[in-house]
Structure formats: structure tokens, C-alpha cells
Image (spheres, rainbow, N blue to C red):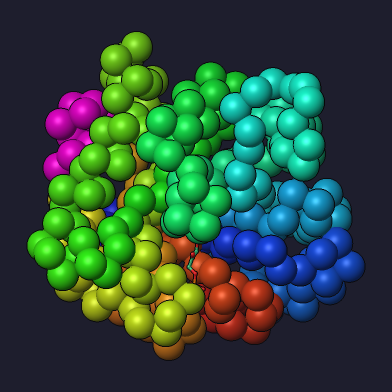
Amino acid sequence: MASLRTPILAANWKMNLGPTAASGFFESFLSRYAARADRTVIMFPSAIALSAARHAAQARPDIQFGVQNVHTAEKGAFTGETSVSMAHDAGAQFVLIGHSERRHVFGETDAQTAEKVSRVSAQGLAPMLCVGEKIEEREAGQTNAVVARQLRAALEGLVKQDARAVGPLVIAYEPVWAIGTGRTATPQDASAAHAGIREELRGLSGAAGDTIPILYGGSVTATNASALLAAPGVDGLLVGGASLDPESWAAICSA
Ligand code: 13P
């Protein structure tokens, strides 16, 4: 049985599409994708393109926005960083946290991820926490253990304060070996990992753990989106490369 939660389609543009390109994207995308009550669309442009993107989509309140990263401090001498308040002021409702590129390219630790989740939640934005195993971890049969560790590390502090504090929160399962590689998890792989994540979320926050959407990400395309979205336990998709083209993103949002 497919999930009864409203599917979330989220676009992570990474370091692509500046303000001008973002405006052009929306002109094309919005003409191809009409608002649908049975879909939630969230866009993560680069922080510097967020205002232009929101402006270009101002006639479409169904499109929501987020940023790809934040710093844990409120303000100060942190050259190049963005605070949660700044992201909020620019119109972000969501923050990607712990994306595999943050973890593995920029060396972000589980502890930093936890701090970011707490800070973002405390300021009323919704964390979209990314978890996922590397290929050697998968081959060693450690997928569930790795993902459980990442979830516990990021969420335990939050849950200790109040189990109901877990929310709004979205989890994105993105196996590192599937990101940008063209090697997609099968719907069965995704379902198996999502079941492990759901179990861990229930263990951490009881019944509240049932309400947290779990998205799949990693080489999603307009061709494989429907099958992944139909997989049991998959509540939506987090898309990189295929979200940069308005036509393919519109097709994925309508999958
Ligand atoms: P790709 O869809 O390009 O594989 O990227 C996935 C991703 O990292 C989304 O956050």
C-alpha cells in the first residue's frame, strides 16, 4: 500500500542556478505545473537565489521554500555563513540539514547536525534531515545501523526535551552511492530502508514518529519517480540534478 501522507516533492538545487536563472526556471516551471492539493512542492535554491526565486513564484503560494544549510550561531563573525533568522527573513520555511555533501565534502559531524536540528526547530523552521549510508557500509550490511546512528545523533537531544517537539520535521533517506551517480535505489531498497527509519523514529518519539514524512533521494528522474513514489513507506522525493530542468521537475511533481 502506498503512503497516505501527501507526497512531498523537494528540489535541492545545490550550487546551481543563480538569481537570474532561478527566475527563468520559475517562469517555465509554473506554466507546466498547476497547483495540486495532493502534492507539496518545496524548493531549495542557493541562499543567494532564494529571494529572486520567491519573487518569481509569488503568485503561487503552493510552492514552499527552504535553504540548503545554516550555521548554528544566531549572528557574528562567521564569514560566508547564513543564520536561521536570516533564512527565515528571506522566506525559508525549511532547512536541509546533514546532506551527504555537507557530511562528506565539508566534514560536518553528527554533533553539528544535531545542533543545527535543535536550532532550526527552536526558531520555528522545519528541519529536513538527510541520512544515508556509503557504499561500503551498504555492502557490509550496515545500512540500518548507520542510518539509525545518524537519526539518534541528530534527534535525541530534541526528543529528550519533549517527544512532541519532533515536528515539524522531514527525513530524507539519501544513500550516498545513489547521489548524482545515476545509480538509483530500487523501490524495494527504498522501502526497506524507510521501514528501518520509521522503526527508529517510533523508538525515539513514540506515536509522533508515525507522522514524520520520509523522502527518498538519489538519482531520481522523471522516468523512475512514479515507481519510487509508489513504494510502500516512501512519502516523497528529494531531487538534485533532475530538478534543475523545469520540464523534468514538472514531470516529477506530477508523477
Ligand atoms: P541527485 O538527484 O542529483 O542524485 O541528487 C540527490 C540529492 O543529493 C538531493 O539532495
Q: Is residue 157 among the parts visible in the rendering?
A: yes
Residue 76 location, quadrant: top right
Q: Is residue 9 above or below residue 224?
A: above
Name the spot of residue 252 as percent of width and height, x first: 51, 76
Left or right: 55 with respect to 119? right
**Residue found 27% across the figure and 69% down from its top:** 135
x, y percent for residue 153: 31, 32
| As drawn, 59 above or below 164 | below
Front in this rendered view, residue 60 or 79: 79
Identified at 16% across, 52% down, the residue is 144
Quadrant position of the N terminus in the picture = bottom left
Locate residue 56 relative to residue 216 in the image: left or right.
Answer: right
Q: In terms of depth relative to the viewer, which is nearer, 149 or 185? A: 149
Is 202 magenta? The answer is yes
> In this image, 47 relative to 97: left or right?
right
In the image, residue 75 above or below residue 41: above
Magenta segment: does it hold 110?
Answer: no
Residue occupying image coordinates x 85% and y 62%: 19
- Residue 245, percent from left and from top: 66, 80
Q: Which residue lies furthest to the top in this view?
A: 161
Main SS of residues in magenta: helix
x, y percentage for residue 207?
20, 29
Span highlighted in magenta in the image:
199-210
> Does residue 168 appear in this view?
no
Quarter placement of the C terminus = bottom left
